[in-house]
C-alpha cells in the first residue's frame, strides 16, 4: 500500500505532465492552422501546373522526342523510395504509418527481385527504417532547422533527385507522405513522381481544343523546363501536406494524452482520499479503544 | 476598353487575380504585351518585371524570377517560380538574389548555364537601376 506522500507525489507529477501535453496540444493547434493555410494556398499552383502539363503532354506532337522524366528510362529495375516523415515524435501514429507503408512497399519490391534505394526526409522515418533497411538507405535529408517550409526546400530535394536520375541511379521514384484530409484523418500515401504520372485532364479544357497553342521557345523545350518544376511542386505539396498532417496528428495525440492524464488524476485522487479517510478512522479507533481500556 | 482575366500564381500563394487591360511579360524569347484576344501561346519566362495595367494610369509591377505563362483569348495565367510585388521589394532582396545567382555562376562549369545565369544577373541589375534604388 502506497503511503499518502507517495500518492501525493504521483498526483503532482501526473498534473505536471498534463500541463505539458495540454500546452503541446495548444501549440500544435496554432501551428496546424498555419500549416493548413500554407498547404491550401499552395494548392492552386500545383493544380494549374498539372493542368498545363496535362494539356501539353496530351497535345504533344506524336513522334517528338519525349523527355526522360515523362517517358521513364524504359526499365524498372531500381526503385527509389522518398519517405517524408516528421523531425519530431509525439504525434501518434503519424510517423509509424508512413514508415509502415514504405516498408511494405520496399519488401514487396525486394521480393520481386528489384533493387530498392531509400531517401529519408525527416529523422523519424530514418530511425524506424534504419533497423531493417540499413544498406538501402542512401541519404537522410533533415529539415530540422527549417522554420517555414518554402519553395527552396522542395527545390533542393528535387535537384538532388534529378541529379541521381541523370546519373542513372534509379528508374522509378515514389514519394511517401501523409495526405491531410482533416484534423483527425491523415492518409499515408504513395505517389509516383518519376517518371511523371500525369493524369489526363478530366476538366473540360479552358479553350476549345482546336485552338492550337503557339510555343515559345519550342514544345519540347517547354516540356523539358516544366517537368523538373513539376517535380519540385509535387515535392513541395507533399512536404506541406505532411507538415499539416503532423500537426493534426500531434494535436489528436496530445488531446487524448491530456484526457488520459485527467482520468488518472481522478483515479489517484480517489485512492488518495480513501487512504486518508482510512487512516483517520484507524487513528480514531486507536484513541477510542485506548480511552476505553482505561 | 475590353479586359481579360489575369491570374498570377506563386508557389506559396495567389498573388493577383482579376480583370485587367494589359499585361507586359518578360518572355524568354523577348518582352511581350498581352491584350484581350491574344492568340494562344505558352511561353517560359525569364527574370524581369511584369507590368500589370488594370486600367489606364493604374497598374502594378511585380518582379518575377522564372516560370511560365499560358495565354489565350480570354485569360492569362502566369505561374511564377518566385514573384515579389513592387511594394514588398527592397534593395536587400535584389542584392541577395544577385549574390545567390553569382554564387551559382561560379559553381557551374556548364557553358549554357553560365550564359543563362549571366542573363539573370543582368536582368536583376537592370531591375535595380529601373527602381532607382
Image (spheres, coloured by chain):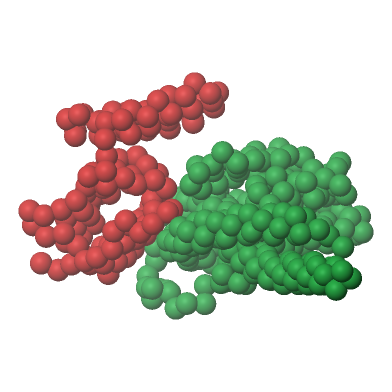
Towards the viewer: B3 or A190: A190
Chain with red colouring: B
Image position of A121 with respect to B19: above or below: above
Figure quadrant of the N terminus of chain A: bottom right
Residue A266 placement (x, y as % from top left): 68, 71
Towards the viewer: A187 or B1: A187
Figure quadrant of the C terminus of chain A: bottom right
Asked if one can make out residue A198 in the rendered structure from this viewpoint, the answer is no
Q: Residue at x 38, y 32 (%)?
A: B97
Residue A46 falls left or right of residue A171: left
The quadrant in which residue A45 appears is bottom left
State the hue of chain A. green
Residue A122 placement (x, y as % from top left): 67, 46
Towards the viewer: B13 or A146: A146
The quadrant in which residue A90 appears is bottom right
Q: Residue at x 29, y 66 (%)?
A: B75
Residue A259 falls left or right of residue B119: right
Amino acid at each position: 500500500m502506497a503511503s499518502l506522500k507517495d500518492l501525493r507525489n504521483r498526483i503532482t507529477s501526473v498534473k505536471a505532465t498534463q500541463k505539458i501535453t495540454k500546452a503541446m496540444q495548444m501549440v500544435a493547434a496554432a501551428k496546424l492552422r498555419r500549416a493548413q493555410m500554407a498547404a491550401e494556398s499552395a494548392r492552386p499552383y500545383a493544380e494549374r501546373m498539372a493542368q498545363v502539363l496535362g494539356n501539353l503532354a496530351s497535345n504533344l506532337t506524336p513522334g517528338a522526342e519525349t523527355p526522360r522524366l515523362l517517358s521513364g528510362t524504359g526499365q524498372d529495375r531500381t526503385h527509389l523510395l522518398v519517405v517524408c516523415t516528421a523531425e519530431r515524435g509525439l504525434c501518434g501514429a503519424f510517423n509509424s504509418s508512413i514508415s509502415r507503408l514504405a516498408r511494405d512497399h520496399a519488401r514487396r519490391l525486394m521480393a520481386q527481385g528489384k533493387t530498392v534505394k531509400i531517401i529519408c526526409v525527416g529523422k523519424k522515418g530514418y530511425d524506424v527504417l534504419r533497423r531493417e533497411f540499413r544498406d538501402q538507405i542512401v541519404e537522410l535529408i533533415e529539415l530540422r532547422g527549417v522554420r517555414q517550409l518554402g519553395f527552396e526546400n522542395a527545390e533542393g530535394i528535387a535537384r538532388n533527385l534529378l541529379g541521381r536520375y541523370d546519373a542513372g541511379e534509379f528508374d522509378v521514384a515514389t514519394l511517401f507522405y501523409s495526405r491531410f484530409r482533416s484534423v483527425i484523418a491523415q492518409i499515408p500515401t504513395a505517389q509516383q513522381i518519376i517518371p511523371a504520372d500525369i493524369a489526363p485532364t478530366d476538366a473540360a479544357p479552358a479553350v476549345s481544343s482546336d485552338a492550337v497553342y503557339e510555343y515559345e521557345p519550342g514544345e519540347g523545350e517547354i516540356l523539358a523546363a516544366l517537368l523538373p518544376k513539376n517535380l519540385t511542386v509535387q515535392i513541395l505539396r507533399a512536404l506541406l501536406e505532411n507538415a499539416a498532417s503532423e500537426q493534426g496528428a500531434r494535436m489528436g495525440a496530445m488531446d487524448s494524452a491530456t484526457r488520459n492524464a485527467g482520468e488518472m488524476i481522478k483515479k489517484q485522487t480517489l485512492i488518495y482520499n480513501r487512504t486518508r479517510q482510512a487512516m483517520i478512522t484507524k487513528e480514531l479507533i486507536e484513541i477510542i479503544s485506548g480511552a476505553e481500556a482505561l | 476598353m475590353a479586359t481579360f482575366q489575369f491570374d498570377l500564381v506563386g508557389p506559396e500563394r495567389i498573388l493577383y487575380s482579376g480583370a485587367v487591360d494589359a499585361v507586359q511579360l518578360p518572355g524568354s524569347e523577348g518582352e511581350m504585351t498581352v491584350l484581350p484576344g491574344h492568340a494562344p501561346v505558352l511561353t517560359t519566362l525569364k527574370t524581369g518585371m511584369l507590368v500589370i495595367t488594370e486600367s489606364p494610369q493604374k497598374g502594378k509591377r511585380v518582379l518575377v524570377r522564372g516560370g511560365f505563362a499560358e495565354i489565350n483569348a480570354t485569360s492569362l495565367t502566369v505561374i511564377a517560380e518566385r514573384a515579389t510585388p513592387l511594394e514588398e521589394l527592397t534593395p536587400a532582396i535584389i542584392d541577395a538574389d544577385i549574390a545567390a545567382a553569382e554564387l551559382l555562376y561560379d559553381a557551374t562549369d556548364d557553358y549554357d548555364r553560365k550564359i543563362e545565369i549571366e542573363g539573370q544577373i543582368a536582368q536583376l541589375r537592370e531591375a535595380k537601376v529601373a527602381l532607382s534604388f
